[in-house]
Amino acid sequence: MSIGNSPEDERPFENEHVEADREEARPSIGRALQQARIAAGLTVDDVSSATRVRMNMVHAIEADDFSACGGDVYARGHIRTLAKAVHLDPEPLLAQYGDEHGGRPAPTPAAPLFEAERIRPERRGPNWTAAMVAAIVAVIGFVGFTMFQGDDSGNEANVAEGSTPSDSASPTTKTKKPADPKPEASDSAIAAAPQDKVTVRVAAADGRSWIAAKDHNGRMIFDGVLKQGDTKTFQDSSKVHLVLGDAGAIDLFVNGKKIEENFQPGAVERLTYTKGDPEAG
């Protein structure tokens, strides 16, 4: 009969060493994000501009400091946003964050994030009500005017005089119609873009996207979000720099010609165009 530990008794200690080695081999969350950003050729300023996360917050997260995020919910949101911006799968990082910070957070704090979506449909009610009231008033006015017109022949002169405002109202509707062809005018202006300048038009065709544009001196021309259907046109004497937050949602026209690029949804693209672009097509 032997005294001491059997080989089976020593296996748990070996497993603990293996797990410890794996933990040491796995990079931290901040280190993984930093390495992916560098591999993607992006600076902290590029990531901050594309994600709207402040530069000091990006630096802090890459240093594994989540204290300034304001809680686990916001820390997870920043990790997911930064991971997508540097083309990294966020799920392993979120799982690692849960292991290191006590698992997944309670779902209740996330409710305010969806408050804006609940409010939007509620605001549409008054608009429909106002439109219905305006339509009813217009119908009543039209009926009253028709009845007044058919009273007697002596009132025909008054009706003729009363028709003057309706005639004068028609030019107002005509003055509103030229407002509709403005996009066509801008399209023709882009198509006839001067050759001594570079003209870039950005259209959010398939969704909303954050856009940043700078001139040849590096000065910011535009920094904001284009909603689906919105367009922006930028012009400079020699060069326009673009950063597209979601390039897959964008149609791009340079010097009157559409750029046929297979931009992927959610991809961040940094582009520069000059007076001679596109070279062909």
Image: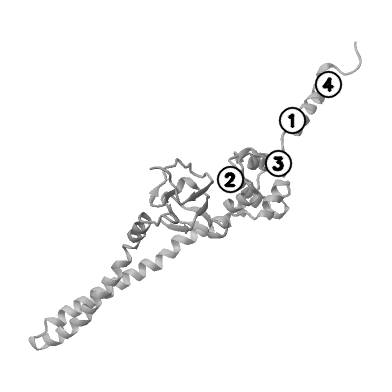
> SS class of the residue under badge 3?
helix
Taking 11 as reference, is 48 above or below it?
below
The answer to whether 125 appears left or right of 101 in the picture is left
Location of mark 4 (residue) = 10
Residue 22, which numbered label? 1
Which numbered disc, 3 or 4, marks the residue closer to the eye?
A: 3
Q: CA distance from mark 2 to mark 4?
A: 45 Å
Compare residues 164 and 36 and report the one nearer the observer.
36
User: Which numbered disc, 4 or 1, marks the residue that appears first in the sequence?
Assistant: 4
CA gap between label 2 and label 3 equals: 15 Å
- Of residues 214 and 26, the one nearer the viewer is 214
Q: What residue occupies the far front of the structure in this picture?
A: 196
Residue beneath disc 3: 31
| Image location of residue 95, percent across then percent down | 65, 39
Helix, strand or loop for disc 2: helix
In contact (CB < 8 Å): disc 2 and disc 4: no
Q: Nearer the viewer, mark 4 or mark 1?
A: 1
Question: Which mark is nearer the camera, 2 or 4?
Answer: 2
Residue in view at x 46 percent, y 58 percent: 235
> Which amino acid type is marked by label 1?
Arg
Most extreme residue toward the left is 153
The mark nearer the N terminus, 3 or 4, is 4
Between 194 and 184, the residue placed more toward the observer is: 194
Identified by mark 3, the residue type is: Arg
